[in-house]
Amino acid sequence: MLDEQLIAEAKVPGLKPTQQQRSRALVVRLMNEGLALLEEHDFDGLSIEALCARCETTVGSFYARFESKDAFVDTLQRLVVEDRRRELAARYSSDRIPRGDLAQLLTWITKGGVIWLKRHHGLVRASLRRAGSDLGSWTPMRELGRIQVEYALPLIVELLEGRPTPDLEQRIRFAFQIMYGTLNNMILIDPGPFTLQDAATPRLLATAMLRLIDPTKP
Amino acid sequence: MLDEQLIAEAKVPGLKPTQQQRSRALVVRLMNEGLALLEEHDFDGLSIEALCARCETTVGSFYARFESKDAFVDTLQRLVVEDRRRELAARYSSDRIPRGDLAQLLTWITKGGVIWLKRHHGLVRASLRRAGSDLGSWTPMRELGRIQVEYALPLIVELLEGRPTPDLEQRIRFAFQIMYGTLNNMILIDPGPFTLQDAATPRLLATAMLRLIDPTKP
DNA sequence: TCAAAACTAGAATTATAATTCTAGTTATAA
DNA sequence: TTATAACTAGAATTATAATTCTAGTTTTGA
């Protein structure tokens, strides 16, 4: 659920500034209903008329706030990304990071990723699709991936105790690339045999990552 | 390059039967130029007018052959899939399959996959995007994945010599899911750090798969 | 209280491309 | 050779949704 505060703080271009409470409330409704609609339709299928109907408003009001449909979805993406950015910051500075062993740390990471993706299934899928034509539109999501790797990489290296060789770092980065790839693919085409819903998914992903990073582990 | 013979053999619904040589030649041109155009544009961006201009024909002729733009891309996909199906059949019945050890076999698989994907980059990306809205449109590609796993799985099990446990099979299938996911993600958003062009990509993928399947290997 | 600014409503407009239609042109086969 | 079917050309049509526009309505601040 995106709220007024987040929207105010993450000032996004393409969202025209509001002066009155009623329009701030409208933006909140549009954002959340937009997110909901993206669970069913993708970017093209998301109709502004339909969105406005669900928000009990009209296209006139919509365009009083947003440049365009593109700007609307960009805004949505920016907010969700900003939300996740904060979540990651909190997560990686909490004292609940499993520092016991690498297997636990990686399972914690994959589980967290799966949970977030399930929550934002619709928007992520729409972003993936849009990325096919407009590569730039994936940039904020890519950034999110980068951030998580920056947080996790030192933790992983530390757990391994060995010297951080370029080769190790390469394997760690590729492990994350595998994780994101596998999860994105589930979101987009759900190829099976494992889905985002399967409890085995984060476990298997963590295992694959663990063994790629540290071959000595079972 | 798709040729007349393949088109004749893989009879596709949505492609109206041809009676004359000139229209068979036209279909060949449309298919190959379509494939070329999909390297630059995706499904929506592919304009029928533009395609016809490149083929030195007109939309009238196009619609004499194809139901619709959808049918056109479906046909393209069917042909490429049929082509790959044959390629896989040949590949897996050749005597050049590396049967020495699992690492070699997996590298052979990942390299083959990367080469094919590079060749059909455009169509695969378009199919991935289309899949976001119409899940059915990925079905033929999914089938290709299934086929490859059916071919490879027994070979892998054989190399491991142990009893084929359900757990082993699960890990093998997940290894392939990882491979397809990582590669599809490269095609769609090219997240880095590794790309389809990097020589390290098939190698790292094979390593990840190997270690997931057989933890005793380095 | 009241004028100006901000906002909302929703019909009308616009843009874009796919698709259709009809009049020619070319190939086929009796 | 010629009637017919197959095909091609490309202008006109259609469909769909985003976007604009203008006339009300509500909020704000003096």
Image (tube, coloured by chain):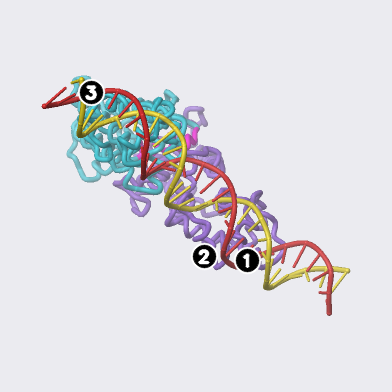
Chain colours: A cyan, B purple, C yellow, D red
Q: What's the residue at 30%, 34% (across, down)?
A: A216
D10 lies above or below C18: below
Q: A149 and A118: which one is in front?
A: A118
Residue pointed to by mark 3:
A97
Q: Is residue B120 left or right of residue B2?
A: left
The amino acid pointed to by label 2 is Ala
Q: A39 and B184: which one is in front?
A: A39
**Callout 3 crowding tier (Cα within 10 Å): few <14, some 14–19, many ≥20:** some
Residue A104: quarter of image:
top left
The amino acid pointed to by label 3 is Ile
* Mark seen at residue A218: none
**Callout 2 crowding tier (Cα within 10 Å): few <14, some 14–19, many ≥20:** few
Q: Which residues are magenta?
A: A178-192
Residue pointed to by mark 2:
B53
Label 2 vs label 1: CA separation?
15 Å
Q: Chain of mark 2?
A: B
The mark lying in front, picked from 3 and 2, is 2
Looking at the magenta stretch, what is its main secondary structure? Answer: helix
Q: Position of residue D22 (x, y in %)?
A: 36, 40
- Residue A166 showing in the rendered view: yes
Q: Chain of mark 3?
A: A
**Callout 1 crowding tier (Cα within 10 Å): few <14, some 14–19, many ≥20:** few
Label 3 vs label 2: CA separation?
59 Å
Tags 1 and 3 touching, CB below 8 Å: no
Q: Is residue B120 left or right of residue B79?
A: left
Question: The C terminus of chain B is located in which quarter?
Answer: top left
Q: Secondary structure at mark 2?
A: helix
The amino acid pointed to by label 1 is Ala
Tags 3 and 2 touching, CB below 8 Å: no
Q: What's the residue at 61%, 60% (across, down)?
A: B60
Q: B160 and A117: which one is in front?
A: A117
